[in-house]
Image: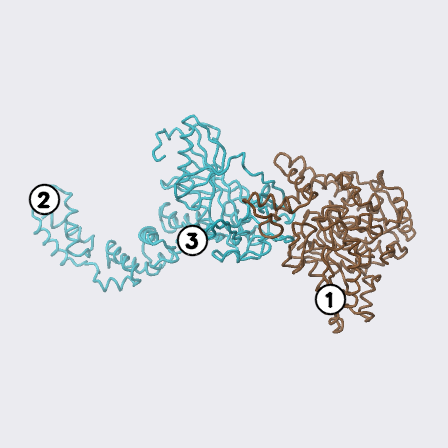
Amino acid sequence: MADPPHDVSAWETVIGLEIHAQLATRSKIFSGSATAFGAPPNAQANLVDLGYPGVLPVLNGEAVRMAVMFGLAIGARIAPRSVFARKNYFYPDLPKGYQISQYELPIVAGGQVDIVLDDGSARRVAVTRAHLEEDAGKSLHEGLPGLSGIDLNRAGTPLIEIVSEPDMRSAKEAIAYMKKVHTLVRYLRICDGNMQEGSFRCDANVSVRRRGAEKFGTRAEIKNINSFRFVEKAINYEVARQIELLESGGKVVQETRLYDPDKGETRSMRSKEEANDYRYFPDPDLLPVELDETYIQSVRAQLPELPDQKAQRFVAQYELSGYDAQVLTASSELADYYETVVRTAGGSPKLAANWVGGDLAAFINRDGLEISASRVGAAALAGLLRRISDNTISGKIAKDVFEAMWDGQQEADAIIEARGLRQITDDGPIEAAIAAVMAANPVQLADYRAGKDKLFGFFVGQVMKATQGKANPARLNELLRQKLSG
Amino acid sequence: MHSETVAELIAGLKERKYSATELAREMLGRIQRAQPELNAFITIEAESALAAAAEADRRLAAGGAPPLTGVPIAHKDIFCAAGSRTTCGSKMLANFVSPYDATVVARLRAAGAVVLGKTNMDEFAMGSSNETSHFGAVRNPWDPSRVPGGSSGGSAAAVAARLVPAATATDTGGSIRQPAALCGVTGIKPTYGRVSRYGMIAFASSLDQAGVIARSAQDAALMLGAMAGFDERDSTSVDAPVPDYVGGLDRPLRGLRIGLLKEFFDKGLDPAIEACLRTALEALRAQGAELRDVSLPNLPLSVPTYYVVAPAECSSNLARFDGVRFGHRCEEPRDLKDLYERSRGEGFGAEVKRRIMTGTYVLSAGYYDAYYLKAQRVRQLIASDFARAFAQVDVLIGPTTPTVAFELGAKTADPITMYLNDIYTIGANLAGLPAVSIPCGFVQGLPVGLQIVGAHFAEERILNVAHRYQRETDWHARAPEAYR
């Protein structure tokens, strides 16, 4: 299905996402077990997590606080009274035979998330609701031939499920929304956002309709996608599948599908008819969660500066473009890094933005690091930028210095001195180099003088080469223009 | 010693009339001898009981021992006790040894009580005759051809037969009060939330409440004082101080407003039972109480309401018994579905399956509103009826059961007839109210129970009324001939 022979522009894609974010509480939502990732199987499962006869759930107040924080951050209504319900189904990784979730009365209702696409256009995605629930355990098959193992370490880990309206119209928008929510939960420090460990994952509801049609098409739900890249691939695959199906006279059936990242396709898991009847009803073991205005205000007071607020401030305070501000506020750690650089370097905030959002980000991504693990710290980068600002080195040389810093962890000044990279700003050596280049390239000189202005760049390059890139670019341009014009 | 009450045993132990070990041996002997006829126990725990008794004797000798030190009791086999087999009367849990203590078990141990064993019960507390137990029916000490009532039939029979002076019990629709009535003993179901449910195997979470069966209101007060109180492990337990139940027992009844429920004295009540009740009410009036007629128009809807709400909750609560982590597992399962179906099919008895199916049905898509939601609304109406009644009266008094103990097998063929046994008791569960059943006479040689229902957290008051009645009468002190 790489190349569908259909008129894709005749169709409109409609996407809604259900994001599951694990809340970063120390203990589980209804028991005192630890939630740390990576413990040996069942080392973090107590009698409550195992669903032993007679045990009862007790709500972790920290999970409530985190859910409220999320609701406030997206401008949602915090329910003064929300209710936990049981979602009943049998599965070995679900010890009680039901999952405690919220159904009719979720803790967070409404709200919105603003996204900016790569082309700079903005969209607003409405959030229907966000509710608290417990995660299930995991089935293990590796190393257990003919058997299934159950690891209940994850059972009872608190989740917030964030349900969007079907407001997204492309995989790109879906990713932008998911990334924004990811940014938000990490700003709020309510989720570690680790997608490999399953701390942040989503289900996508995807349908297509003829452009201009009012009614939504029949949707398929793609389950448990745990990377941004897979979200894009899964949605694009599913959209192409549905369009092809409809154009060949078929019908989309409402069903749950699973994305297979190895094959790059979605496949049917169960149809609507096979869907479980979850028999939701209010959990009689838990009291309704009642939150008064005083409590909600106390949580509001804990809200940090949010990504949108920070981006606006960066535009105003550092005179950055909206795009730069967006890039630099993608995580609070990156934003903090940037602000440290600006404060320490003291030069142009735009220069710092280019470096933090450009070269630094490229190296970080190349090595798959978090900004907190950057091999060049904010103070060291500021040291480098100071040498650009005071004309000790050119921007071009600075890139080499940066690479050396990244590899060797030395300070910029030490590298500049050791390698003799200090910029040549005296006219004498630059003029000598120009004279030599002109002498060595008589044909080009003649052509230039005959009106081939484009050759100016050639001469700049040659002189730079002759000075090992150390010539001050501004001075070089000025002197070269004089000499060439004769 | 076996005929002494808890209050008398506390004094006897303190005065060294006998040791806790002698007492435990005596009662264990009685339990062993009664077991072939009554089958009141599922597990007799002689070894751990004697060790606990020896420890009690050391503490009694050392002085400063807690109030119930050395008093022998039994737990309904619905309460988890660390290291103790806890079956809930089911094949499903016939092999289940609990790794932890229920809060009730831990509190009574801390109070010094010596546990002699676990009493028989209807499977998962579902039944009104103790005939659904996987471990066989319990028989009524007053007439072994008759049922003791249920689901706490083992506890009621054990107390009536003087095998233990008191036993824990639970009540979801009458499971403490109905067997207490049929066995001629005193049983109190406290306010919902008064006693922790942690470690008590759930039947219907919004209705289940732990309580006690004893031979007098005074003993019930002593036991309840040790069991009650907030537990951070049960979110539905109430954080309110526990009053001194014993201290309030003697309060005079002058001015007490007793409501007589029109709906309780309706057709269906055995006239001989009604006669006993009327005599008892006169005795209370003689102590200065006033009698008033009260009506709870929605009360007749209790039984159908209960049989929607309780099965709905049970269908979900019993889902954890799936053969995966504990309890019965079928032999050689072919696959997961087979494991579930056969483990549950083999592990649960007919009444439990009936309720799981009913509960699954009433929660299903398309039926939820018509059954579960409607039942919850009716439940609210019934609770409001009670609230209005308690604006006019202090307690409500009526029968506990429509008849005295019936023959084994008499009602097993027709579940509905069996369900109607709970007609007078279910209302208190639906409204979460405290209620006590006390003996008030005999019909054809079988005990009759009188039920006193109080407002929320009025345990002190209903025990007070029960105690004042028991001061003037001796019905509660009578023992079946074979077990005197």
Q: Disc 2 designates what residue? A: A449
Q: Residue furthest bottom?
A: B62
Q: Which mark is residue A332?
A: 3
- Crowding around mark 3 (Cα neighbors within 10 Å: few <14, some 14 to 19, many 20+) is many
- Work out whether disc 2 and disc 1 sit on a shared chain: no
Specify the chain shown as cyan. Answer: A
Asked whether the beta carbons under mark 1 and mark 3 sit within 8 Å of each other, the answer is: no
Q: Is residue B137 left or right of residue A337?
A: right
Q: Which mark is residue A146?
A: none
Q: Tell me which numbered mark, 3 or 2, is placed earlier along the sequence.
A: 3
- Front label number (1 vs 3): 1
Specify the chain shown as brown. Answer: B
Q: Residue at x 9, y 43 (%)?
A: A447
- The picture places residue B140, in percent across and down from the top left corner, at 81, 51
Answer above or below: position of A216 versus B427: above
- Between the C-alphas of marks 2 and 1, the distance is 116 Å
Give the amino acid at mark 1: Leu
Q: Residue at x 35, y 56 (%)?
A: A342
Q: Disc 1 designates what residue? A: B50
Q: Is residue A289 visible?
A: no
Mark 2 element type: helix
Mark 1 element type: helix
- Crowding around mark 1 (Cα neighbors within 10 Å: few <14, some 14 to 19, many 20+) is many
Q: Where is the N terminus of chain A found, in terms of image quarters?
A: top left
- The picture places residue B162, in percent across and down from the top left corner, at 82, 58
Q: How was the colour assigned to the protein in this rendering?
A: by chain
Give the amino acid at mark 2: Arg
Asked whether the beta carbons under mark 3 and mark 2 sit within 8 Å of each other, the answer is: no
Which chain does tag 2 point to? A
- Between the C-alphas of marks 1 and 3, the distance is 65 Å
- Crowding around mark 2 (Cα neighbors within 10 Å: few <14, some 14 to 19, many 20+) is some
Viewer-proximal residue among B465 and A398: B465
